[in-house]
Structure formats: structure tokens, C-alpha cells
């Protein structure tokens, strides 16, 4: 039986994997939160990997507080870059397939067509820069690593835009939400399913699937305002949602104005079917 380690397992993607992995009885999933496995500590990692053979590692650990990262650069780079370097090295040493997750925030958002894996990243935030360094270190150690860039992740657990909007819509009679940042919301359970599909594909077709960067989000395009309006429509709250520009909603970190991802490569390579973002949002809210 193959051992699959999930790091950062208590975050929203880690939790989504736990839900989606239930039918995969052919794998032994090991869910490690920070207390079980601190990936910033190379010695702890070495001991952990020495105890049992790990066939694959899905790295869900990350520093994801985008605004805080602007004043907490060392912590963001420690987890999003240095720890990924540690993990890549240990995975390389032990023949472990690493699946690492990255972000649309590696792009500057100046493009007006969906970003493909070949487009040049140019992060505008500390979070985006730290994630880009993490990608490079993972692929630098082992080109067989699979890096999945995703965008606007949400689920019914953890900290995310859906949960924040639901809280604010209960507390307030009106909300301002930016309409000049465009991307695609992604349901964490859909991403978790694709990760397991890719892993299974990798195990079954060892050597024929190239490592590298793959883009994955749900289908379609939205602004954060559209996302909020869809949440309001599905949940039926009375709170008014008002469109504002990014200038009218200042934040510490700059976000890309446009970060829609082109998903052709992941579709062609793994034959994945991708749900439309509004359908997945409805499914997520219905599951709460
Ligand atoms: N959230 C989003 O909108 C998006 C996320 N991504 C990427 O997807 C991936 C998953 O994100 P998501 O699930 O939302 O992230 P979360 O912030 O929900 O979870 C990250 C997890 O990492 C854990 N962690 C923190 N420090 C360490 C450490 N030293 N060792 C091990 N684990 C640690 C945290 O644990 P603790 O709670 O104990 O600190 C937390 O459970 C990340 O790579 C992220 O960059 C990409 C695009 C969008
Ligand atoms: C809460 C709130 C946010 N906003 C704006 C701020 C920002 O420009 C945008 C998104 O808000 P958030 O700060 O919730 O989302 P943000 O932390 O920017 O989300 C990002 O997280 C990281 C981890 C990623 O990798 C990205 O793909 C993306 O999902 O919406 C409003 O306009 N009104 C509001 O009431």
C-alpha cells in the first residue's frame, strides 16, 4: 500500500483532501499538522522520513495571509520558500513524489488573456514572491515535482473569502467589494479531487507524466464582487453588496488585476473535467 503524506493537513486544502480521500482505500494517507511535522525544521523532516517510506507528499502547508506577509516577510519566505526547499530535498533523497501547491498571485495581472504555464510570473506582493521562490526550489531540486498553481481557494472550513463574506453579510447591512480584480474562485474539494487523480495517474504511468507547473482553477471568470454577489444569491442574505475599485478598498498587499488561469495543459495531460465555479460554490454552500 502506498503511503501518502499530507503536510499542513489542518488547513482548508488539507481538510478537503481528507474528505475527498475517503474512498481511496488503496492508499494510506498520513495527515500531518504543524504539531506533527514542522516542515521548516530540516532535522525533524529527516527523522520523519527516516521512520517510514513515503511514496508521495502533498504539501498543503503555506503562509497564506497575503496582507500580513507584507510586514512579515521572513515568516512568509521561511514557510513558502525555505520549508519547500527542505521538503524537496528530503523527497528527492527518499524517492518521494512531491506535489506542491502555488498561486495565481505569482502573476502581475497586467495580461488580458488567461495565464498559461509559459507566461512570465512577476509577483507584486511578498506572498506571491515567496510562493514563486518555493516553486523554483521544488522544481530545481527535482524536475519531476508537480506544482499546481490555483486561485481564490475556498471551502467550508478555514479562512477564506466565502466564509468571510458569510460572516460580514450576517453582521452588516451593506458591503463594499472590489470589481476590478478578476480571476476564478476554486472549491478546495475540486482541487483535492484533481490532486488525487493526478497522483493516481502518476503512480499508474510512472515515467510518462512530466513534472512541472500545471494550472488549475474552476471554470469561468469572476471579479471578487461577482463572487460576493453569487454568495449573496445562493445564501439569500439581505445584505447589499456594492461594487468598488481597488483604490476605494486599500489593502497592504497589491493583488493582480487579472489572474485567470489557462487550464489547457492539465486538461490535456490528465483528462480532468473541471466544474464551473458557480456550480461548485452552490455545492460547497449546500454541504455546510
Ligand atoms: N487560500 C487560497 O486562497 C489559495 C491558496 N493557495 C495555495 O494552496 C495551498 C493550500 O492553501 P490553504 O489550504 O488555503 O492554506 P491554509 O492557510 O488554510 O493552510 C495552511 C496550513 O499550513 C500549516 N502550517 C503553518 N506552518 C507550518 C509549518 N511550519 N509546518 C507545517 N505546516 C504548517 C498551517 O497550520 P497552522 O494552522 O497550525 O498554522 C495551516 O494548517 C497553499 O500552498 C497556498 O499557497 C493557492 C491559491 C489560493
Ligand atoms: C473582505 C473583503 C475583501 N475585499 C477585497 C480585498 C481583496 O482585494 C479581495 C480578496 O480578498 P481576500 O483578502 O479575502 O483574499 P486574498 O487573501 O487576496 O485571497 C488570495 O489568497 C491567497 C492565499 C491566494 O493564493 C490567492 O489566490 C487568493 O485566493 O477582495 C473587498 O473588496 N471587500 C471585502 O469586504
Image: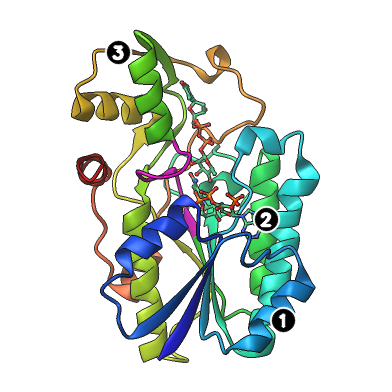
Residue at the spot x=22%, y=27% of the render?
A: 235
Q: Position of residue 93 (x, y in %)?
A: 69, 87
For the N terminus, the image quarter is bottom left
Q: Position of residue 70 (x, y in %)?
A: 72, 35
Residue at the spot x=73%, y=62% of the render?
A: 40
- Per the model, the C-alpha gap separating discs 3 and 2 is 36 Å
Q: Residues within 10 Å of mark 2 (few under 14, many from 20)?
A: many
Start-end of magenta stretch: 149-160
Report which residue position mark 1 lands on. Answer: 47
Residue 80, labelled with which disc? 2
Query: Residue 264, can we see it?
Result: no
Residue at the spot x=24%, y=63% of the render?
A: 273
- Look at the picture and state if 224 lies above or below 190: above
Tell me which numbered mark, 3 or 2, is placed earlier along the sequence: 2
Main SS of the magenta part reads: loop
Of badges 1 and 2, the one in the foreground is 1
Query: Residue 23, can we see it?
Result: yes
User: Which corner quadrant of the image does residue 109 belong to?
Assistant: top right
Quick check: is 154 in the magenta stretch?
yes
Report which residue position mark 3 lands on. Answer: 239
Q: Residues within 10 Å of mark 3 (few under 14, many from 20)?
A: some
Ligand 1: does it lie within 8 Å of the C-beta at label 1?
A: no
- Per the model, the C-alpha gap separating discs 1 and 2 is 21 Å
Tell me the SS state at disc 3: loop
- Look at the picture and state if 212 lies above or below 188: below
Ligand 1: does it lie within 8 Å of the C-beta at label 2?
A: yes
Q: Residue furthest top?
A: 173
Amino acid at each position: 500500500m502506498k503511503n501518502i503524506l499530507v503536510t499542513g493537513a489542518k488547513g482548508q486544502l488539507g481538510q478537503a483532501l481528507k474528505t475527498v480521500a475517503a474512498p481511496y482505500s488503496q492508499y494510506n494517507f498520513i495527515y500531518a499538522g504543524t504539531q506533527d511535522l514542522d516542515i521548516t525544521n530540516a532535522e525533524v523532516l529527516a527523522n520523519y522520513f527516516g521512520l517510514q517510506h513515503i511514496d508521495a507528499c502533498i504539501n498543503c502547508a503555506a503562509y497564506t495571509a497575503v496582507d500580513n506577509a507584507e510586514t512579515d516577510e521572513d515568516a512568509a519566505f521561511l514557510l513558502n520558500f525555505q520549508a519547500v526547499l527542505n521538503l524537496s530535498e528530503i523527497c528527492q533523497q527518499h524517492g518521494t513524489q512531491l506535489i506542491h501547491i502555488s498561486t495565481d498571485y505569482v502573476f502581475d495581472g497586467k495580461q488580458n488573456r488567461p495565464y498559461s504555464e509559459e507566461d512570465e510570473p512577476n509577483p507584486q506582493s511578498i506572498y506571491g514572491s515567496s510562493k514563486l521562490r518555493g516553486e523554483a526550489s521544488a522544481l530545481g531540486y527535482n524536475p519531476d515535482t508537480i506544482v499546481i498553481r490555483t486561485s481564490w481557494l475556498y471551502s467550508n472550513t478555514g479562512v477564506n473569502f466565502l466564509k468571510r463574506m458569510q460572516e460580514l453579510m450576517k453582521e452588516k447591512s451593506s458591503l463594499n467589494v472590489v470589481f476590478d480584480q478578476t480571476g476564478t474562485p476554486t472549491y478546495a474539494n475540486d482541487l483535492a479531487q484533481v490532486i488525487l487523480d493526478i497522483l493516481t495517474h502518476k503512480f499508474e504511468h510512472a515515467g510518462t507524466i512530466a513534472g512541472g507547473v500545471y494550472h488549475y482553477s474552476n471554470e469561468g471568470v469572476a471579479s471578487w464582487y461577482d463572487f460576493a454577489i453569487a454568495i449573496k444569491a445562493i445564501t439569500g442574505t439581505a445584505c447589499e453588496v456594492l461594487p468598488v475599485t481597488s483604490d476605494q478598498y486599500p489593502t497592504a498587499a497589491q493583488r493582480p488585476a487579472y489572474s485567470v488561469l489557462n487550464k489547457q495543459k492539465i486538461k490535456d495531460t490528465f483528462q480532468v473535467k473541471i466544474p464551473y465555479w458557480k456550480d461548485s460554490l452552490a455545492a460547497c454552500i449546500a454541504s455546510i
